[in-house]
Image: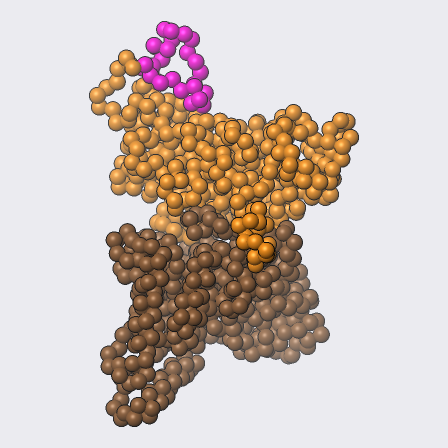
C-alpha cells in the first residue's frame, strides 16, 4: 500500500499531471459528505475508477489503493457553482474576450453555452484552485428575455469541459426581463408565454415526420434536440425563429429545467403561476431576493431557488425586502436553496465565504441562517440536484463522481484554503496566472536579471 | 462646539496667510482670494449620549497592533479612557459588559466608499458619484452628492462595524474632486455626519477609466500618455495659481484651483485610484515633479510588485483582498497582495468600494491573512486588524482622533461575538463616540433610513 502525506501527494500531482483517475483512500480527515449532514471526524473517503465508493465513519480502507493521510485536514466534495460565466470570458471588460453577452445576434433561446466554453480560460483555473469542480454556465440575456441554454462543466485541466450541454434554459423576467423585452414586465411575460406556445406547436408539428422515418427519439435534455424538418409548415405570425422555438421544446415538455430570474415577491408568484398554463415546466427561480415573503408559496410549488445569500440592500425597487436572512427563512419554510449567482465580483471561489456567512446568522438574535451542513450542501449537492444531476456529482455519497477537495481547515472559514483537488478521481494542478505572479514577486526587487527571467 | 472651533481655526489660518502675503509684498490692499471661508459646509456632528461602559473579559485588538487577552476597555464621555488587562480597575459608575469569548476592536474604517453618492436603490436618478463631463473636476465636492438616507450606511454598521468612512467621487475623471470623511451616524444632513476636523481628500484616477470615458467622447485623454499630459498641465496651472495667490495677485476665486492649491500645500490628501504598478511609479514621479504627496493608492492590485517603492514613498495601498480579472488593469491581481506588502514593510489598508463589501472588510482581511499564511507569511490577527483601523485612519488623517483604542481617543468601538477574522462572527454592539448605535440583542437599537420606512422588510429589521 502506497501511503502519502497530503503535501507529498500534491507534489506528485505537480509533475505527473496524471490524466488517469487515481484509486485512493483519503484517511485521517474531517469529512463533509455534502448531503446536508454535519462533518464527520476521521472518516475515510474511498475513490475508485473515478467515482466515490464510500465516505464517512466506519468505512473500511480497501487493499491496493493509494492511501493519502490528510493529517486531520478537511475533505469535501468539490464545490458546485450554480450559475457562472466560467469559460465564457477571459476578462469581463475586454469585449473581444467576452462571450457572456450575445450582443445583437438574432437568436435567444437557441444559444448554446457549450459551443463557446474555453476550458483553458484563467477564471476556470483560478476557480479550480478555489475548490470549485463543477459549474453551470450560461450567458447573459441581451436584447431578448432568453439567455439561452446553459451548460454544466467540470473544471478539470483538460480539453473536455462539458458534463452536460443544454442542461437548462435561462430566462429573465422582473426588471431586467422588462428591459430586455422592450420596457415592461407585461411584455416580458407575453413574450415568454408566446414562446412556450410556439415551441409546443412546433413540437406537435415535428412529431409526425419523425415518427414516419424512425421511432421518436426521447427529448431528454436538449442534447438530442430534433430540429424540425424544413418542410414542416409553421404559421406566418410566429415571433420566434424556428431554431429558437425548437430549443424551447424540451422546456415546455418538462425535460429541460427552466431557470427564471426574478427577485420581487410578486414576480416570484407570477412565475409560479406559469405552471397553470404550462403544467410540465420544471421551474427553478434564480435571485429571489424577496423570496422569504413568498416562501410558503414557493415551498408548496416545490420550486427550488438559487439565491445569492448576502444581498441585504434595496438595490432596485424589486429588492426592497432584501435581507441576509432570506435563504435561512426560505429553507426553514421547506424550500430547496442553492447559493448563486457567481459572476463579476461574486467569484465562484467565494462560495464558501457566502455559505459561512449564513452559518454566522444562526448566532445572531432575530436572524435566520443555515446549519453548517445545510450551508455546505447549498454549494455542493443542492445545486447539482437542481440541475437534475445530484446522482452524478455534488456529494461524497457512493457512486458520485470522484470530485474531491482537501482543505487546510474548515472550508467555510475565511483563512482556509485548498490543498488538493480531484475531478473524476484525477488529481488536478492548482497552478495558474495568479500563483505564478505570486511566486515571481515573492521578492519584488530584481536580482542578477530582470524579473522577466524568473519563471 | 467642536465644529465651530474647527471652522474658526481654518479661517484663522487663512487670515494668517493673507497677512504674510501682504507683508512680504508690501501691499496694503486686501486679498479676497486668500480670505475665503475654507470650511463653508462645516460639520454639525455632535456625539450622541452614551453611558460609561466597561468592556471586560474580551480579547482586545487595539487597532495599533497589540492584542490583550482578557482585556478591559473603558468608555466614558465619548472617549476611550482606559485600555488594559484584567488588572485594570473598573471605576465606580461604569456599566460592566461581559466580553468573555468575545472580541473588542476599534470601529472599522473604510477609506473607499460611495455610500450616499451611489446609494441604494441604484436607480439612475441616484447616480451622483461621477461628474463625467470633464476629465478634471477638482471643483466638485463629494459631500454635495451624499444622500444621508442611503440604506447602505446602516448595513455597514450592523454587519461590518463601520464607524468612519471616506466618500469619494468616482473614477471617471483624472481628478474627480474632493472627498468627505463621515462618522457612520445617521443624520438629516450630510453636515451632521461629517467627521469633525477631518482633512479633505482629493480623488484622482489612473489608467483605463478616464481614457475610456473621454476617449469615447473623442477628446483628450484617450491614452495613458494623455492621462499624464492632462494631469501635468493641470498641476502647472495650479502651481501658477498658488504662486499668484500667495503673492496677493489672484483676484478671482477658482473652486478647482483652491482644491489643487490645498493639495500642493499638503492640507488635502491625495487618494489615487491606480491598479498597475508601472503607473503608480509614474504617479510617484509626477507627485515629486509638482511637490505633492500621494497618501494612498486605491484598488492597487499590483502593489505587491513595488512594495519597496511604496514603502520608500510612505504611500499606503488601499486594496481588496482578492478582486481580480474584471478589467484588463486588474488582471495581475493576486490574493497575496496584502501579505506581500506587509512583508515589504509597506502600509496596507483594506477597502471596499462596494456597498456589500463594506459590510465585510473584516472578512476580506481574514482571507488575505490566510492567503499570506499559505505562502509562508504569517501575520498575527492583531496586525491584520490594523489594516482596517489605524492604518485606515492614518490614510484619512484622522489617526489622532480614532482608529485605535487608546485613552483620549474617540470611543468608536465594536464588540464582536467572536473573532472578527472568522466568518462566523458579527458585530454584537457598536459605539460611535461612546454612543451605542447598534446592538444585535436589541431590535430597536438599529437605524432604519427614511427610504425604508413602511417598505417590506423595513430596512432589514423585520
> Considering only vertical position in the picture, is B248 above or below B148?
below
User: How many numbered discs, if any?
Assistant: 0
Chain letter tied to orange = A
Q: Is residue A208 magenta?
A: yes
Q: x%, y% of residue A261?
A: 39, 38
Instruction: Give the residue displayed 21% in from the left and 21% down from the top.
Output: A236
Instruction: Give the residue displayed 67% in from the left and 40% down from the top.
Output: A11
Q: x%, y% of residue A405?
A: 62, 38
Residue B426 visible (yes or no): no
Secondary structure of the magenta portion, mostly? loop
Residue range (magenta): A205-229
Q: x%, y% of residue A95?
A: 36, 42
Q: Is residue A304 magenta?
A: no
Would you identify the image quadrant in which residue B128 lies? Answer: bottom left
- The N terminus of chain A is located in which quarter? top right
Between residue B93 and residue B340, name the one nearer to us.
B340
Would you identify the image quadrant in which residue B167 lies? Answer: bottom left
Left or right: A346 with respect to A207? right
Left or right: B171 with respect to A325? left
> Considering only vertical position in the picture, is A407 above or below A165?
below
Instruction: Give the residue displayed 72% in from the left and 36% down from the top.
Output: A68
Given the current orientation, which residue lies at the most extreme front position?
A448
> Considering only vertical position in the picture, is B397 above or below A19?
below
Chain letter tied to brown = B
Q: x%, y% of residue B404?
A: 57, 71
Instruction: Give the residue displayed 38% in from the left and 51% down from the top.
Output: A315
Residue B82 visible (yes or no): yes
Amino acid at each position: 500500500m502506497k501511503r502519502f502525506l497530503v503535501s507529498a501527494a500534491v507534489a506528485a500531482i505537480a509533475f505527473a499531471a496524471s490524466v488517469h483517475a487515481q484509486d485512493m483512500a483519503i484517511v485521517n480527515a474531517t469529512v463533509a459528505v455534502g448531503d446536508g449532514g454535519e462533518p464527520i471526524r476521521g472518516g475515510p473517503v474511498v475513490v475508485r475508477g473515478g467515482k466515490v465508493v464510500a465516505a464517512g465513519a466506519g468505512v473500511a480502507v480497501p487493499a491496493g489503493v493509494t492511501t493519502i493521510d490528510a493529517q486531520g485536514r478537511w475533505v469535501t466534495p468539490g464545490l458546485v457553482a450554480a450559475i457562472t460565466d466560467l469559460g465564457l470570458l477571459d476578462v469581463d471588460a475586454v469585449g473581444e474576450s467576452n462571450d457572456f453577452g450575445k450582443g445583437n445576434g438574432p437568436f435567444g433561446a437557441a444559444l448554446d453555452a457549450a459551443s463557446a466554453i474555453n476550458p483553458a480560460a484563467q477564471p476556470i483555473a483560478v476557480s479550480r484552485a478555489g475548490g470549485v469542480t463543477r459549474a453551470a454556465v450560461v450567458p447573459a440575456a441581451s436584447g431578448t428575455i432568453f439567455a439561452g441554454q446553459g451548460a454544466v462543466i467540470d473544471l478539470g485541466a483538460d480539453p473536455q469541459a462539458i458534463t452536460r450541454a443544454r442542461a437548462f434554459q435561462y430566462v429573465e423576467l422582473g426588471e431586467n426581463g422588462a428591459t430586455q423585452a422592450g420596457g415592461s414586465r407585461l411584455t416580458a411575460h407575453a413574450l415568454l408565454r408566446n414562446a412556450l406556445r410556439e415551441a409546443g406547436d412546433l413540437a406537435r408539428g415535428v412529431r409526425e415526420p419523425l415518427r414516419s422515418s424512425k421511432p421518436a427519439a426521447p427529448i431528454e435534455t436538449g442534447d438530442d434536440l430534433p430540429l424540425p424538418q424544413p418542410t414542416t409548415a409553421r404559421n406566418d405570425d410566429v415571433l420566434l425563429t424556428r431554431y429558437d422555438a425548437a430549443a424551447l421544446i424540451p422546456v415546455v415538455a418538462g425535460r429541460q429545467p427552466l431557470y427564471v430570474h426574478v427577485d420581487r415577491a410578486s414576480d416570484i408568484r407570477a412565475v409560479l403561476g406559469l405552471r397553470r398554463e404550462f403544467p410540465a415546466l420544471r421551474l427553478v427561480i434564480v435571485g429571489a431576493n424577496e423570496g422569504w415573503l413568498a416562501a410558503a408559496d414557493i415551498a408548496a410549488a416545490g420550486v427550488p431557488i438559487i439565491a445569492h445569500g448576502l444581498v441585504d440592500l434595496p438595490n432596485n425597487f424589486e429588492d426592497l425586502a432584501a435581507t441576509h436572512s432570506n435563504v435561512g427563512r426560505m429553507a426553514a419554510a421547506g424550500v430547496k436553496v442553492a447559493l448563486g449567482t457567481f459572476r463579476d465580483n461574486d467569484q465562484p471561489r467565494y462560495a464558501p465565504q457566502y455559505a459561512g456567512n449564513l452559518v454566522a446568522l444562526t448566532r445572531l438574535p432575530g436572524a435566520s441562517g443555515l446549519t453548517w451542513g445545510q450551508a455546505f450542501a447549498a454549494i455542493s449537492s443542492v445545486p447539482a440536484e437542481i440541475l437534475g444531476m445530484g446522482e452524478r456529482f455534488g456529494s461524497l455519497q457512493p457512486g458520485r463522481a470522484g470530485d474531491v477537495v482537501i482543505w487546510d481547515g474548515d472550508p467555510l472559514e475565511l483563512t482556509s484554503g485548498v490543498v488538493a483537488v480531484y475531478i473524476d478521481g484525477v488529481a488536478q494542478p492548482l497552478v495558474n496566472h495568479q500563483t505564478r505572479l505570486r511566486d515571481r514577486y515573492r521578492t519584488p526587487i530584481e536580482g542578477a536579471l530582470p524579473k522577466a527571467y524568473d519563471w | 462646539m467642536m465644529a465651530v472651533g474647527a471652522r474658526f481655526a481654518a479661517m484663522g489660518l487663512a487670515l494668517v496667510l493673507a497677512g504674510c502675503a501682504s507683508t512680504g509684498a508690501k501691499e496694503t490692499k486686501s486679498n479676497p482670494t486668500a480670505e475665503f471661508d475654507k470650511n463653508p459646509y462645516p460639520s454639525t456632528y455632535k456625539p450622541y449620549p452614551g453611558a460609561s461602559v466597561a468592556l471586560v473579559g474580551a480579547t482586545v485588538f487595539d487597532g495599533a497592533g497589540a492584542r490583550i487577552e482578557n482585556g478591559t476597555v473603558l468608555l466614558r464621555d465619548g472617549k476611550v479612557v482606559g485600555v488594559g488587562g484584567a488588572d485594570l480597575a473598573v471605576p465606580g459608575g461604569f456599566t460592566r459588559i461581559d466580553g468573555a469569548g468575545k472580541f473588542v476592536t476599534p470601529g472599522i474604517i473604510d477609506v473607499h466608499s460611495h455610500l450616499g453618492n451611489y446609494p441604494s436603490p441604484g436607480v439612475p436618478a441616484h447616480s451622483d458619484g461621477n461628474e463625467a463631463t470633464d476629465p478634471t473636476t477638482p471643483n466638485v465636492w463629494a459631500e454635495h452628492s451624499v444622500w444621508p438616507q442611503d440604506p447602505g450606511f446602516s448595513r455597514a454598521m450592523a454587519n461590518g462595524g463601520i464607524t468612519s468612512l471616506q466618500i469619494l467621487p468616482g473614477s471617471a475623471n483624472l481628478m474627480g474632486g474632493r472627498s468627505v470623511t463621515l462618522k457612520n451616524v445617521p443624520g438629516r444632513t450630510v453636515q451632521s455626519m461629517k467627521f469633525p476636523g477631518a482633512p479633505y481628500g482629493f480623488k484622482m484616477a489612473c489608467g483605463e477609466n478616464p481614457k475610456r470615458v473621454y476617449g469615447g467622447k473623442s477628446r483628450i485623454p484617450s491614452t495613458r500618455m494623455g492621462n499624464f499630459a492632462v494631469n501635468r498641465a493641470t498641476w502647472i496651472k495650479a502651481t501658477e495659481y498658488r504662486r499668484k495667490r500667495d503673492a496677493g495677485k489672484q483676484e478671482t476665486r477658482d473652486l478647482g484651483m483652491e482644491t489643487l492649491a490645498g493639495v500642493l500645500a499638503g492640507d488635502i490628501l491625495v487618494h489615487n485610484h491606480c491598479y498597475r504598478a508601472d503607473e503608480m511609479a509614474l504617479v510617484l514621479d509626477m507627485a515629486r515633479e509638482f511637490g505633492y504627496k500621494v497618501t494612498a493608492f486605491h484598488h492597487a492590485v499590483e502593489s505587491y510588485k513595488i512594495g519597496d517603492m511604496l514603502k520608500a514613498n510612505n504611500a499606503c495601498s488601499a486594496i481588496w483582498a482578492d478582486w481580480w480579472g474584471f478589467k484588463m488593469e486588474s488582471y495581475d491581481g493576486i490574493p497575496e497582495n496584502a501579505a506581500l506588502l506587509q512583508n515589504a514593510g509597506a502600509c496596507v489598508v483594506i477597502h471596499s468600494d462596494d456597498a456589500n463589501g463594506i459590510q465585510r472588510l473584516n472578512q476580506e482581511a481574514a482571507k488575505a491573512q490566510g492567503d499570506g499564511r499559505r505562502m509562508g507569511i504569517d501575520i498575527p490577527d492583531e496586525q491584520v486588524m490594523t489594516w482596517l483601523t489605524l492604518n485606515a485612519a492614518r490614510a484619512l488623517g484622522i489617526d489622532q482622533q480614532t482608529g485605535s483604542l487608546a485613552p483620549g481617543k474617540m470611543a468608536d468601538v465594536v464588540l464582536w461575538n467572536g473573532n472578527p477574522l472568522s466568518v462566523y462572527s458579527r458585530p454584537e454592539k457598536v459605539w460611535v463616540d461612546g454612543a451605542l448605535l447598534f446592538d444585535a440583542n436589541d431590535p430597536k437599537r438599529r437605524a432604519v433610513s427614511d427610504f425604508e420606512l413602511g417598505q417590506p422588510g423595513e430596512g432589514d429589521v423585520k
